[in-house]
Image (spheres, coloured by chain):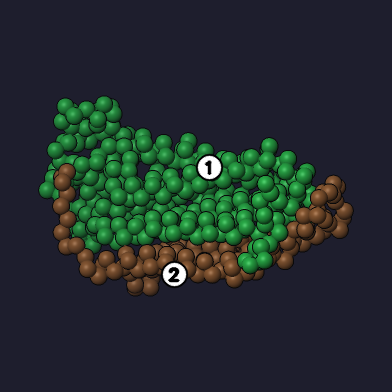
Chain colours: A brown, B green
Amino acid sequence: MSDPHASPPAAAASAPAHGESDHAHGNYWHHVRPYLLVGVALFVFTAITVGLSYVDFDHFLGSHGMNMKIGLGVATFKVCLVGAYFMHLKMEKGTIWRPLVFTFFFCAGLFLLTLLAFSDPIKTTSHLFH
Amino acid sequence: MEIPYTVTPRPDTGLANPKLGIWLFLASEVMLFGGLFSGYIFMRLGAEPWMWPHGWLNVPVGTFNTFVLIASSVTVILSWEALKMRNFKAFKGWMALTWLCGLLFLAVKLSYEWPAKFSHFGAYIKKESAEKYETWLGNEGPDGRLARGLPPRLFISGHPKTWAEVSDPKAKEIVLAAIDEENEKPKSEENDKAHFIPRDMVHLHEGHEVKLDKADLIYGYGPFYPKLNTYLACYFMITGLHGLHVLGGVLVFMYFWGPGAKLYKTNPVQFTNRIEVSGLFWHLVDLIWIFVFPLFYLL
């Protein structure tokens, strides 16, 4: 495993230690501290996202779609926190990163297709049931 | 036969097989939800402004569910760390909290959020018939929505006197015994924006009910089902698929918390890896919700 706190080899761990020492207990909280901080940050940014959605940024900044951009910007930051810390991407190997870069590329392509569709819009639609 | 590289890294990839496998699976999941989000954006940008609703979902409830899911992401990683420290008791505690959070998320969705939609009536009025319902739409006049530069309101929602009228093809009209605040005071500027705390419907006195002629309504009227509009179709599709992922994760966690935990006694490293891999899946479920929440509830 690429994680610096990776589990010990199977042979060494075949007899699990029951009852932990104070040292191990201290280590545990030392290891989980970043996760707790990221969790708190995610709570705070969720509250910020909700608060910001009630501010009319289009009006204040004089530009269309600003609320959408700001809201999704905060969401993207939160997603980066989850990916980097909870999913350990911050310290992951290239073997993991490479397919993810391709995924990101093709996913971006999906969104680009949407934008391309708007450069050649269908002007009229027929509603059969109206 | 023993499956190789479940615990030790493969020499060529440098990773144990489950780790690489789950990441490839997560990549396919990103493409699945990426396609759905792309479709959502396509339909939202292409929708007429009056057709795309805003403020239909209960924001405090959605925020609560977001907190629950984030908390479960923290507890699952704490359970993994506990296993790495060979503290099985702490693992059991954190893991139980994780699947309880998952169940709570699903319970809120299935016992409150979705049923609230299914018991609410809504109908789009055809543009040519809008004048008949002006009292509840508030588009015309110097203080109307059009004069204020807003898209027309062509939607009336509330509770029908009887649901039988809605589904009965012989019934020519639908009588609403209660309507939403937006239709009760359609010209109030308070109703131009979404409210954080959802408001109760306004009950109408006998003889003052809203009568909707079915011939004036656009196809799809009725409960807030996916067929009512594109927004609801996207909402049920994406939150439904996400909910199935939550259910899948909860079942896996319950197994590892219960009968699957026996593996810890014989091979704790493999068991720890299983928790790590299932935890990665759970973080993706959280990650998807982080986008779903603002897109559907707030923006």
What's the residue type where badge 1 is placed?
A: Leu
In front: B76, or B263?
B263
What's the residue type where badge 2 is placed?
A: Phe
Q: Residues within 10 Å of mark 2 (few under 14, many from 20)?
A: few
Question: Can residue B283 be seen in this snapshot?
Answer: no
Q: Which mark, by number, is residue B184?
A: none
Residue at point 42% right, 39% down? B114
In front: A67, or A21?
A21
Residue at point 57% right, 63% down? A83
Under circle 2, the secondary element is helix
Q: Of the residues tagged 2 and 1, which is closer to the observer? A: 2
Real-space Cα distance between discs 2 and 1? Answer: 29 Å
Under circle 1, the secondary element is helix
In this picture, is B203 found above or below A97? above
Q: Which residue is mark 2?
A: A105
Q: Residues within 10 Å of mark 1 (few under 14, many from 20)?
A: some
Q: Which residue is mark 1?
A: B247
What x and y, as percent, mark residue B269?
A: 74, 52
Q: Give the quarter of the image for residue A118.
A: bottom left
Question: As drawn, is A107 to the left or to the right of B17?
Answer: left
What x and y, as percent, mark residue B112?
A: 46, 38
Question: As drawn, is B249 to the left or to the right of B192?
Answer: right
What x and y, as percent, mark residue A91?
A: 65, 69
* Count of residue discs: 2
Check the residue under mark 2 and report the chain it is in. A
Direction left: furthest residue: B128
